Image (tube, rainbow, N blue to C red):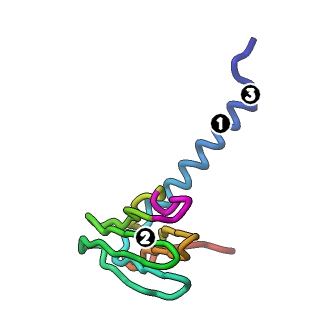
Amino acid sequence: MKLFKRSDIIFTVAIAAAALIIWGLFAAAPLGERAVIMLDGKQIASLWLDEDTIYTVRGEYTNVLEVKDGVIFVWESDCPNQICVKEGAISKSGQAIVCAPNKMTVTITGGEEGGVDAITQ
Protein backbone atom coordinates (compact mmCIF):
# COMPACT_ATOMS: atom_id res chain seq x y z
CA MET A 1 0.00 0.00 0.00
CA LYS A 2 1.41 3.37 -1.06
CA LEU A 3 1.44 6.17 1.48
CA PHE A 4 1.29 8.95 -1.14
CA LYS A 5 -0.07 8.97 -4.67
CA ARG A 6 1.88 10.59 -7.48
CA SER A 7 -0.76 13.33 -7.76
CA ASP A 8 -0.32 14.12 -4.03
CA ILE A 9 3.40 14.70 -4.53
CA ILE A 10 2.87 16.86 -7.65
CA PHE A 11 0.22 18.92 -5.83
CA THR A 12 2.50 19.43 -2.80
CA VAL A 13 5.43 20.52 -4.98
CA ALA A 14 3.20 22.96 -6.91
CA ILE A 15 1.87 24.53 -3.69
CA ALA A 16 5.40 24.84 -2.26
CA ALA A 17 6.65 26.48 -5.47
CA ALA A 18 3.75 28.96 -5.48
CA ALA A 19 4.42 29.83 -1.82
CA LEU A 20 8.10 30.47 -2.55
CA ILE A 21 7.26 32.71 -5.51
CA ILE A 22 4.77 34.76 -3.46
CA TRP A 23 7.24 35.04 -0.57
CA GLY A 24 9.93 36.20 -3.00
CA LEU A 25 7.70 38.93 -4.38
CA PHE A 26 6.92 40.33 -0.93
CA ALA A 27 10.49 39.96 0.34
CA ALA A 28 11.73 42.07 -2.57
CA ALA A 29 9.44 45.02 -1.79
CA PRO A 30 11.31 48.14 -0.63
CA LEU A 31 10.92 49.40 2.92
CA GLY A 32 8.48 52.27 3.12
CA GLU A 33 8.97 55.67 4.72
CA ARG A 34 5.46 56.65 5.84
CA ALA A 35 2.21 55.11 6.99
CA VAL A 36 -0.83 56.85 5.51
CA ILE A 37 -3.92 56.44 7.68
CA MET A 38 -7.37 56.76 6.13
CA LEU A 39 -10.72 56.79 7.92
CA ASP A 40 -13.92 56.50 5.91
CA GLY A 41 -12.04 57.34 2.70
CA LYS A 42 -10.34 60.48 4.04
CA GLN A 43 -6.68 60.79 4.97
CA ILE A 44 -6.44 61.64 8.66
CA ALA A 45 -2.71 61.18 9.30
CA SER A 46 0.66 60.36 7.80
CA LEU A 47 3.25 58.94 10.19
CA TRP A 48 7.00 58.53 9.65
CA LEU A 49 8.08 54.93 10.23
CA ASP A 50 11.40 56.02 11.74
CA GLU A 51 9.69 57.94 14.58
CA ASP A 52 8.29 55.70 17.33
CA THR A 53 4.81 56.88 18.30
CA ILE A 54 1.32 55.78 19.28
CA TYR A 55 -1.66 57.11 17.29
CA THR A 56 -5.34 56.59 18.10
CA VAL A 57 -7.98 56.44 15.35
CA ARG A 58 -11.52 57.12 16.54
CA GLY A 59 -14.40 56.28 14.25
CA GLU A 60 -17.27 53.89 14.82
CA TYR A 61 -14.67 51.86 16.74
CA THR A 62 -11.25 52.78 18.13
CA ASN A 63 -7.91 51.53 16.76
CA VAL A 64 -4.65 52.16 18.60
CA LEU A 65 -1.70 52.11 16.16
CA GLU A 66 1.92 51.88 17.20
CA VAL A 67 4.97 52.80 15.15
CA LYS A 68 8.05 51.12 16.59
CA ASP A 69 11.43 50.16 15.12
CA GLY A 70 10.38 51.01 11.56
CA VAL A 71 7.10 49.07 11.50
CA ILE A 72 3.48 49.93 12.23
CA PHE A 73 0.79 47.69 13.68
CA VAL A 74 -2.62 47.86 15.32
CA TRP A 75 -1.81 47.41 18.97
CA GLU A 76 -5.40 47.44 20.22
CA SER A 77 -8.89 47.69 18.74
CA ASP A 78 -12.42 47.41 20.02
CA CYS A 79 -13.81 46.23 16.67
CA PRO A 80 -15.70 42.91 16.74
CA ASN A 81 -13.49 40.67 14.58
CA GLN A 82 -9.96 41.89 15.55
CA ILE A 83 -8.56 41.04 12.09
CA CYS A 84 -6.66 44.34 12.03
CA VAL A 85 -4.83 43.35 15.24
CA LYS A 86 -4.07 39.85 13.93
CA GLU A 87 -2.56 41.22 10.67
CA GLY A 88 0.61 42.13 12.53
CA ALA A 89 3.30 44.64 11.66
CA ILE A 90 3.91 46.10 8.19
CA SER A 91 6.85 48.10 6.86
CA LYS A 92 7.19 47.52 3.12
CA SER A 93 5.91 49.88 0.46
CA GLY A 94 2.44 48.82 -0.71
CA GLN A 95 1.52 46.76 2.35
CA ALA A 96 -1.72 47.62 4.15
CA ILE A 97 -3.72 46.95 7.28
CA VAL A 98 -7.51 47.19 7.06
CA CYS A 99 -10.11 47.48 9.80
CA ALA A 100 -13.34 47.08 7.83
CA PRO A 101 -15.73 47.62 10.78
CA ASN A 102 -14.06 50.99 11.52
CA LYS A 103 -13.51 51.86 7.82
CA MET A 104 -9.81 52.45 8.60
CA THR A 105 -6.80 51.61 6.44
CA VAL A 106 -3.08 51.99 6.97
CA THR A 107 -0.96 51.90 3.81
CA ILE A 108 2.83 52.06 3.59
CA THR A 109 4.17 54.54 1.03
CA GLY A 110 7.54 55.86 -0.06
CA GLY A 111 10.76 53.94 -0.12
CA GLU A 112 12.76 53.15 -3.18
CA GLU A 113 11.03 53.88 -6.42
CA GLY A 114 11.77 52.33 -9.78
CA GLY A 115 12.38 48.76 -10.77
CA VAL A 116 10.26 46.69 -13.08
CA ASP A 117 6.65 45.98 -12.13
CA ALA A 118 5.69 44.07 -15.26
CA ILE A 119 6.92 43.18 -18.71
CA THR A 120 4.54 42.71 -21.64
CA GLN A 121 5.01 41.77 -25.22
**What type is the residue that disc 3 sits on?**
Arg
The front one of 78 and 86 is 78
71 is within the stretch colored magenta: no
Q: Is residue 113 visible?
A: no
Instruction: Indicate which disc, 3 or 1, sits on the residue closer to the N terminus.
Output: 3
Q: Callout 3: 10 Å neighbours few (<14), some, many (20+)?
A: few
- Name the side, left or right, on which 94 lies relative to 71: right
**What type is the residue that disc 1 sits on?**
Thr
- Residue 44 position, x and y percent, is 43, 86
Residue 13, relative to residue 30: is it above or below? above
Please name the residue shown 46% across and 74% down the image.
106
Mark 3 to mark 1 CA distance (whole Å): 10 Å
Please name the residue shown 59% across and 45% down the image.
17
- Residue 42 position, x and y percent, is 51, 88
Badge 3 element: helix
Magenta residues, start to end? 78-85
Q: Are marks 1 and 2 in contact (CB under 8 Å)?
A: no
For label 3, the residue is 6
Residue 58, relative to residue 7: is it above or below? below
Instruction: Indicate which disc, 1 or 2, sits on the residue closer to the N terminus.
Output: 1
Q: In the figure, residue 92 lies in which quadrant?
A: bottom left
Can you say which quadrant of the picture contains the C terminus?
bottom right
Please name the residue shown 59% across and 42% down the image.
16
Q: Callout 1: 10 Å neighbours few (<14), some, many (20+)?
A: few
Main SS, magenta residues: loop
For label 2, the residue is 63
For label 1, the residue is 12
